[in-house]
Each structure stands twice: as structure tokens, then as C-alpha cells.
Image: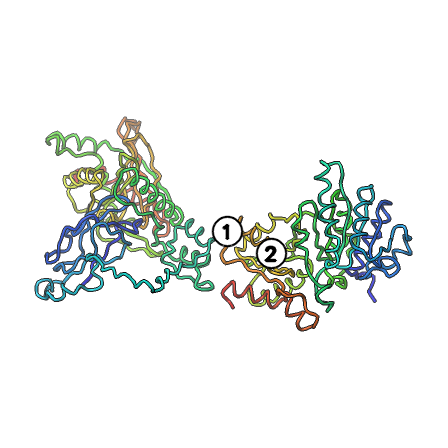
Amino acid sequence: MNTPTRISYREALREAHREALAKDPRVFLIGEDVGRYGGSYAVSKGLLEEFGPERIRDAPLSELGFVGAGIGAALGGMRPIVEVMTVNFSLLALDQIVNTAATLRHMSGGQFSVPVVIRMATGAGRQLAAQHSHSLEVWYAHVPGIKVLAPATIEDAHGMLSLALDDPDPTVIFEHALLYNLEGERPSSWPQIDIERAAVRRSGADVSLICYGGTLWKTLAAANTLASIGIEAEVIDLRVLRPLDEETILASVRRTHRAVVVDEGWKTCSLAAEIMALMAEQAFYDLDAPLSRVCSAEVPIPYAKHMEEAALPQPQRIVDSVKTMLGRG
Amino acid sequence: MSEFKLPSLGADMDRGRLLEWRVKPGDVVKKGDVVAVVDTTKAAIDVEIWSSGTVQDLLLQPGDDVPVGTPMLRLADDGEPATVATQPPRMSAPPQTLMSAPAPRVAPPAHAAPPPAAARRRISPAARKRAEELGVDLNKLTGTGPDAAVTIEDVLRAGAASTAVAPPIAAVGAAPISERASAMRQTIAAAMARSKREIPHYYLATEVPLERATDWLARANAERPVTARILMAALFIKATALAAHKYPEMNGFCRDGTFEARSDVNVGVAISLRQGGLVAPALMNTDSKPLDDIMRGLTDLVKRTRAFSLRASELSEPTLTLTNLGEQGVELVQGVIYPPQVALVGFGKPTRRAWVEGNTLRLIPVVSLSLAADHRVSDGHRGALFLAHIRELLQQPDTL
């Protein structure tokens, strides 16, 4: 179906897994249906055949159990990749992640590290209803001791996994469910990336649009619409949700003097709230308009398609928000 | 009937505090009469009225601290019957603008909702910061942002459009010298920063032989009592005034990018104050005054400046400024123009120097003469002619 020069986000992830598994014998993948079924979003399809059941391990339906197993393996010197089907299900494993993985380096006085990588799907848009569709990234971004990544591009989907495996501390990677089918040119060689900095995906002088993961593409679409009416938006892809790249965010808003944060999480206590607080604290005197955000409606994400769409940040809402801010509404 | 409003007594004044009235209702005043004493950041200033007539009402009372442009008194114009004496009913029912009468305070009924607090103007933090940097008065801006908020764009537009807006200066209350000095520092800072921001200065300098002027002064002073002696500074002032009359692009005000030449020459003389700070009040009509008058005027001006007692017109009317830093041993002045003026003439310290004239080398007194001028209004060529004319005039002291 794909021409050889095209690659999807899903395939980029699979390729990253394959490279990691091939490069380091300590790496293994564990999760529900990652083996025979090929992963709930088909990321690991074919890996069982290639690497065998020792390294591509189907786990029983117990997030607490298999995430804990991954953390234990990491403590024991392995480099596990734990796949959790969705962030909703990861709540069952919060105790392992927040109370164990995130704390052990601190509680052992630096004697133990937990180099586990926990991947999970997040976000809505596929009519999977309220128990499979939420964006709870901020729950993890709240916790010291873990790094939280949100690859929004094919390059980041590919590159972040190995960097996360190299990190001696626990890393949570959020893959937005709508991005798996994202396709793009396959780069002739994968670019060097980092997992420290936010990325400016589009430059503009009039307003900073700050987003991450699944909202990047909606935000870029909004920026194109805005450009057609003469408003140049700068689009910041956070990439790393914890620790936040404050420098890039602040530099952008100091330049544009206006910011809209786009976040698929619910508005109350959202990551957007944190970023707005950051700007209010550190760039107050550079602001030329009240900060604004486009978040999900404060409801469990609805099943019905039109309701689901209405609940989520959409390009038009981003455009409207910017126009209001600029007095062009 | 007309209203006399608090005038701006200098480009950097935006408020004043009424210290005392010098007139009362019923008084007949003529243009130029002192009607009030107003305290500004620079001095207690005698405010002169601009028109003649009969004082009808006093609209302020001593102690009122008001922005420039606030009506101070109402004047029945000449020929118009004053209503003070002839229409007593009006006095018994004071017009609303009569603020000198204590405003009756009616206690609101206990159950009434508190009056809505005046809505705070919406001014973005960045706009405030920018306005401060540019010296733009936010009170004069109309916000064009959402909900009529003042945005950076509004500030930049105002900053670009107007050279007349003065930065807000904290008004001083009474007059402890230290407070006034600090307020004056702010005032000078604002005016000078604005000057350097807005005025494209160019600088010229030349050397002026003072042999003839020195000799002439010595002869002239020999016949005078000590109190009537003339200083070299008076010659500098007169020569500058005459040259400014001949080169009008050095004499006047540049406002909103438009230059308005003045036919009268009022040389502002920079006078430093003992506690620090600087005022440059005008010697009015300098070009048409004989040297003796200039000397007397200068002495008087210095005395009154240091006593913080200047007339309004002396502060608002200088058409160019002269600064003489020679006393401090400075050789050359490169001045900052005082907006909205367009030129500043500087004299350094007259010193005896080797001077070549023809094929002869002689030791004579020489002074450095410099000009800082506004390139929006004049060019270096005219500036050079202006300086050359001052130099020439100083070679003919008897004509001054």
C-alpha cells in the first residue's frame, strides 16, 4: 500500500523497536496482546516472529502486574519496554509507576535506578468512548522522577524510543491514537533528535500556539487558516511534557506577546494550566493579551461521533481563540 | 466667558499642584498677570494668564493636584459683564465645575449597593512596559485591542506619531528639597531619554577667538560699578540669540514631526541647582534686549531658579538652550537637545591658547563653541553657518 519512500508513525515505532531489540539484548517488550496479536495498535506486528516469545512477551490482563514486572526487570538490569493499551488502563498501574518507579532512585539514595520505558496510547477521535479516549498525560507530568514524552511526528516516534531506553530513569511515552496512521516521507536517514527541547514547528510573530502530541496537526492546520487572514502563528510542539522546556516556551511568547495553549486534556488542572502559569509567572510583562487555552470539554469523552468531535480541541476553535485574542473575532 | 486651564510649563510637565491664588473673583486681570503659584517637579512657578478680563470663579483650591489642561479659573472677557457682582444668584448656585467650594458629600442610603468601582482600564502588561520605555503617556491612548484594551501596537503607534507626549512623572507633593530633587531627576531623565530617542542629533564644534570680546569687556566693565558689570556669558547669550534670529531653523519647536519656527528668540539658559538637577528657563526676547538687560535678567534668573520661583513663560517658552559648562573647566560641550526645542548651543571654558592668525602665532583667549541640532529640522551646513555667525558676532562685541 505504501510506496517504499513513505512511512507511517506506526511503522516508525515498529522500526525503532526492531532496532532497539537488535542492538541491545537487555531490551524486551511486554504488554497485552503485543505478541500474537501484534499489539492493540499493531505497533509490534511481526516482532514476535522476528525476536521470539522471550523478548516479545504477551502479558496477562493486569496492568499492575506487568508494569510492575517491567519495573522489576529494569531494577534487575534489563531495559524493558512496557506497552499499555491506553492511558485509561494505565491508571491500574499508577501505584507501580508513581510509588515505585518514580521514587526508587530517591528512596535508595541513588543506589537503584529504574530504566523502564512505558509506552501507552492516549487521546480520543476513534469513537472508543469514555474509557479508552482520555488524555491523562498531565497525571504523569505532575510526578517528579519520571520523564514524559509525547512524540507528535514520525521522526520523534522513531527517535524517542532509543533515547528513552538510554535514560537511566523511568520514561513514559504517550502515543496519540490518531497519530498511528500518520504518514510521511521516509527520511533517508533518521535525524538526530533529543528528548529535552520543545520544537518550533512553525515560526510566526503574532501568537504562540503551544501544543503537543495529537493536537500538533490540528494546531498546524489552524495556523495555516490564520495565515490566510494575515495572522502568523508560531507553533510550539512541546515534545517533552516533563520536564518542560521552559526556555523555548518563554522565548516564543516573549517574541509574540500572545499565547494559546492547545491541550486535549480537560481544562481544569491541565497541562495547559501549568504552561499558562509558567508564562504568567515568568513572561507577565511581555504579554499583550490574556493567555488563552483550547482544551477538551469537561465531560467524559462521548462515543457519538459528532459529540466526540465537539468535545475535542478542533482547528476552528483554535482559530477562533486567536481571532478573539487579536480583536479580530 | 472663557476658562483658563493649567498650562504645561515645559515639555516635561504633566501635572501641577496649586499652591496659592494670586487673584480672587472680581479681580480684573490682563494678559501676563500672575494669577496663581503652581508647584511642579521643577519649581514653584508663577502662572501667568493668557487673556485679559475679570476673574469670575476660581475652580481649584490650594492643594489640588491636577493634570495639565484642568480648568483653573473662569474669566469674563473684556467687555463682557462679569457676573460676579451683577448676578449674585449664580454665586449662590455654583456651577458644577466650581470645585473650590467643598463638594457636598451625600451619604448613600445604607441599603444602597456600593457605587461600581471605576473600571480599571485594560492595558496589557507588555503595553505598559513598552509605554514606559518609550515615554508614552498611557492616559492619552485609546485601546484598540479586544475590550478596548491598550496593546503594544497602540503604544508603538502613539510613540511613532507623537513627539508631544511626555512620560508620566510622579507628581511631587509639598516641597521637601530631596523629594523635589528626585522628581527632578526623573523629569530630566524622561526629557533627555525622549530627546535621545526621538531627535536625530548632529554635532558641530568650532573654536572662537575671544581676544576682542575680552578686551571690550574689560573696557566696558572698567567704567561700571561692581554690581553692573557684564560677564562673558551675557555676550555668549546675546550672540547666540542674534544668530538664532538669523537662522530660524535653530529657534523654535518641533512637535509631531512638524517644525514651528519662532519669531521671538527666548534663549533658555541652563542653570544647575545646588542640590543637583538642572533647569533651563528663558531670557525672554533675548535678541532684542541690550546687554545690560541680559546681564540683569541672567542674574535674576539664576537667583529665582535656585529659589524655585520662576514664571510659567520662562519655563515653557525657551526657543533654544544655551549651556555654559566653562565654569567647571569643561572644554567642549556635546549637548542633548531639550524637546521640543531643536538646538542646543554649548560654550566651554575660555582658555589662553596659541592662535595662528595669518602668519603670526599669538596667545589669546579661545573658547570652544558647539552645537547639537535636530537633523529633522536643519542640516550640518546651516548649523555650520549658524556657529560661524555666533563666532563673527563675538568678534564685534560693540555691536552686541
Chain letter of the residue carrying label 1 = A
Q: Which of the two marks, 2 or 1, is nearer to us in this view?
A: 2
Picture coordinates of residue A31 (x, y %)?
Answer: 82, 55
Q: Where residue A221 sits: x, y (%)?
A: 64, 65
Against A309, is A162 above or below?
Answer: above
User: What is the distance, in whole Å, between disc 2 and disc 1 at their CAs?
Assistant: 20 Å
In the figure, residue B301 lies in which quadrant?
A: top left
Q: Is A234 on the left or on the right of B47, as rendered? A: right
Q: Please tell me which residue lies in front, A237 or A145.
A: A145
Left or right, B151 with reference to A167 = left
Q: What's the residue type where badge 2 is placed?
A: Cys
> Which residue in the rendered view is the most extreme toward the front?
B110
Front position in the image: A189 or B184: B184
Q: For mark 2, does the 10 Å Cα neighbourhood hold few (<14), some (14 to 19), or many (20 or more) residues?
A: few
Residue placed most toward the observer, B338 or A53: A53
Kindly identify which numbered label has been placed on residue A269: 2
Q: Position of residue B224 (x, y in %)?
A: 11, 32
Residue A143 as seen in the image, left or right of residue B53: right
**Taking A292 as reference, is B40 above or below it?**
above
Please, which residue is most extreme toward the left here?
B86
What residue is pinned by disc 1? A284
- Residue at (26% x, 29% y) in the render: B365
In screen coordinates, is B377 left or right of A206? left
The residue under label 1 is which amino acid type?
Answer: Phe
B234 to B355, vertically: above or below? below
Check residue A78 in the rendering and tell me which mark sits there, or answer none.
none
